[in-house]
Image (cartoon, rainbow, N blue to C red):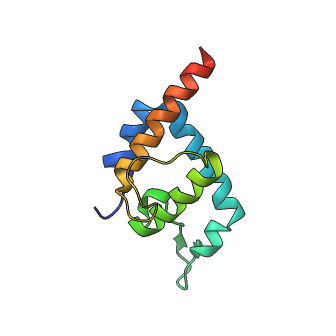
Amino acid sequence: MDNLNKENFWNDVYDKYPNATQVFCDWIDVYKKENNWDELFNAGHDTRGDLTEAPKFHDLPIEMQQGIWIKFVRETNPDWMSDSGDLYEFNLEYEIKIFLEEEEIRKNLINF
């Protein structure tokens, strides 16, 4: 898998786990500001004067998505770990779905 793009992944998990996915969306917005995302990816104008945009999370290479996801999990729920074993060798699509599903259930129980 090249990346977890919006069309084949993020729209689907948002439909299934809207509350938990929104937590990630809010977190990634803060992460982008704290890390000067636009500057990091040279958003603005290129040498021809054309407007360029920084990539969205789902457009990053899968390795970058994985690293950012690990940071998100560690910051938002450090006790969570799926049964997949090694934190750095896992199926990112599976891990995100499992995490969001469990968070959605937890949020629904809290709001019940």
Question: Which residue shows up at 49% across the image and 32% down it?
Answer: 18
In the rendered view, tell whether residue 48 sits above or below residue 41: below
In the rendered view, tell whether residue 72 sits above or below residue 107: below
Question: Which residue shows up at 38% across the image and 64% down it?
Answer: 89
- Which one is in front, 103 or 44? 103
Task: Classify the position of the N terminus by image quarter.
Answer: bottom left
In the rendered view, tell whether residue 6 sits above or below residue 65: above
Is residue 6 shown left or right of residue 24? left
Is residue 69 shown left or right of residue 77? left
Residue 101 in percent (x, y) is at 44, 34
Q: Quadrant of residue 4?
A: bottom left
List the single residue furthest toward the bottom.
47
Residue 87 in percent (x, y) is at 46, 60
Is residue 5 shown left or right of residue 32? left
- Which one is in front, 89 or 38? 89
List the single residue furthest toward the top.
112
Residue 19 in percent (x, y) is at 54, 31
Residue 39 in percent (x, y) is at 65, 73
Question: Which residue shows up at 37% across the image and 59% down it?
Answer: 90
Question: Which residue shows up at 49% across the image and 59% down it?
Answer: 56
In the rendered view, tell whether residue 35 sits above or below residue 94: below
Task: Classify the position of the C terminus by image quarter.
Answer: top right
